[in-house]
Image (spheres, rainbow, N blue to C red):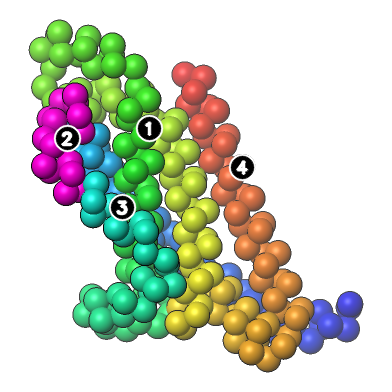
């Protein structure tokens, strides 16, 4: 075992880990920036909500469902022209982030919508009775009350993005997934495959632990 580990290029694994973390951080940031407003809009325009609008909600819901139903590997390939137009390359960290965002944003938006639906309607009614505007209700009542659920949604989305980032290696997305495919699979270097899997498991476990602790802390307030 020690001889096999000595044959591993740890520098490559280190850079691949950095690439994976870069893809995760960049894609999660844009996913939250796009998915949070979308999730709020889905909630507000839903049935019996503050800005109930059947047609708009139906259109948004259909778009979210369509994007969520496309397997991510296929989405990677379909979005190559869009990625090239947006960042100038479909390879590496930069080329992986746009499809990661497109793939994860619908999921996060749905999770945000669900978190907002779990807020006690009485809180909204009380805010309305005090004359609060829709913006004030969302910012001052809904989001603070739903924050534990939103943090849990961020955690789940981050874990999903780890698996998506690994899959992006199929089309040269870089990171641990690309390393596992090029060396672990194509060159039959089993030790590289095992190391990348272990690192991904550690990353997922770390994200879950951090997310759970933040949710517990917010829930106690």
Residue with the mark numbered 2: 45
What is the spatial separation of the Cα atoms under label 3 and label 2, in whole angstroms? 16 Å
Q: Is residue 140 left or right of residue 197?
A: left
Residue with the mark numbered 1: 115
Looking at the image, residue 118 lies above or below residue 54: above
Residue 58 lies in the magenta stretch: yes
- Classify 10 Å Cα crowding around label 4: few (below 14), some (14-19), many (20 and above): few
Instruction: Report the residue at 34% width, 39% height from top.
Output: 112
Residue 19 lies in the magenta stretch: no
Quarter location, residue 188: bottom right
Quarter location, residue 86: bottom left
What is the spatial separation of the Cα atoms under label 3 and label 4, in whole angstroms? 29 Å
Instruction: Report the residue at 70% width, 64% height from top.
Output: 198
Residue with the mark numbered 4: 209
Looking at the image, residue 117 lies above or below residue 199: above
Q: Is residue 202 visible?
A: yes
- Classify 10 Å Cα crowding around label 3: few (below 14), some (14-19), many (20 and above): some
State which tag comes first along the sequence, 3 or 1: 3
x, y percent for residue 104:
38, 57
What is the spatial separation of the Cα atoms under label 4 and label 1, in whole angstroms? 20 Å
| Furthest-bottom residue in this view | 187
Q: Which label was assigned to residue 65?
A: 3
State which tag comes first along the sequence, 3 or 2: 2
Q: Is residue 6 left or right of residue 146?
A: right
Q: Quadrant of the N terminus?
A: bottom right
Which segment is the magenta one? 45-60
Q: Nearer the viewer, mark 4 or mark 2?
A: 2
Residue at disc 1, secondary structure: helix
Q: Which label was assigned to residue 96?
A: none
Q: Nearer the viewer, mark 1 or mark 2?
A: 2
Query: In the rendered structure, are the residues bearing label 3 and label 2 in contact, judged by CB atoms less than 8 Å apart?
Result: no
């Amino acid at each position: 075992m020690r001889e096999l580990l000595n044959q591993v290029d740890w520098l490559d694994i280190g850079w691949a880990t950095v690439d994976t973390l870069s893809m995760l951080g960049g894609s999660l940031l844009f996913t939250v920036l796009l998915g949070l407003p979308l999730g709020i809009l889905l909630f507000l325009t839903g049935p019996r909500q503050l800005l109930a609008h059947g047609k708009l909600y139906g259109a948004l819901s259909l778009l979210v469902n369509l994007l969520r139903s496309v397997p991510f590997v296929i989405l990677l390939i379909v979005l190559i022209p869009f990625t090239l137009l947006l960042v100038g390359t479909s390879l590496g960290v930069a080329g992986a982030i746009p499809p990661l965002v497109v793939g994860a944003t619908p999921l996060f938006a749905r999770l945000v919508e669900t978190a907002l639906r779990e807020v006690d309607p009485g809180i909204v009614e009380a805010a309305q009775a005090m004359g609060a505007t829709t913006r004030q209700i969302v910012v001052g009542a809904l989001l603070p009350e739903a924050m534990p659920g939103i943090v849990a949604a961020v955690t789940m989305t981050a874990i999903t993005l780890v698996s998506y980032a690994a899959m992006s290696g199929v089309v040269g997305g870089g990171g641990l997934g690309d390393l596992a495919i090029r060396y672990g699979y194509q060159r039959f270097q089993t030790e590289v495959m095992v190391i990348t899997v272990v690192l991904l498991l550690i990353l997922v476990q770390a994200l879950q632990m951090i997310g759970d602790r933040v949710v517990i802390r917010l829930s106690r307030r």
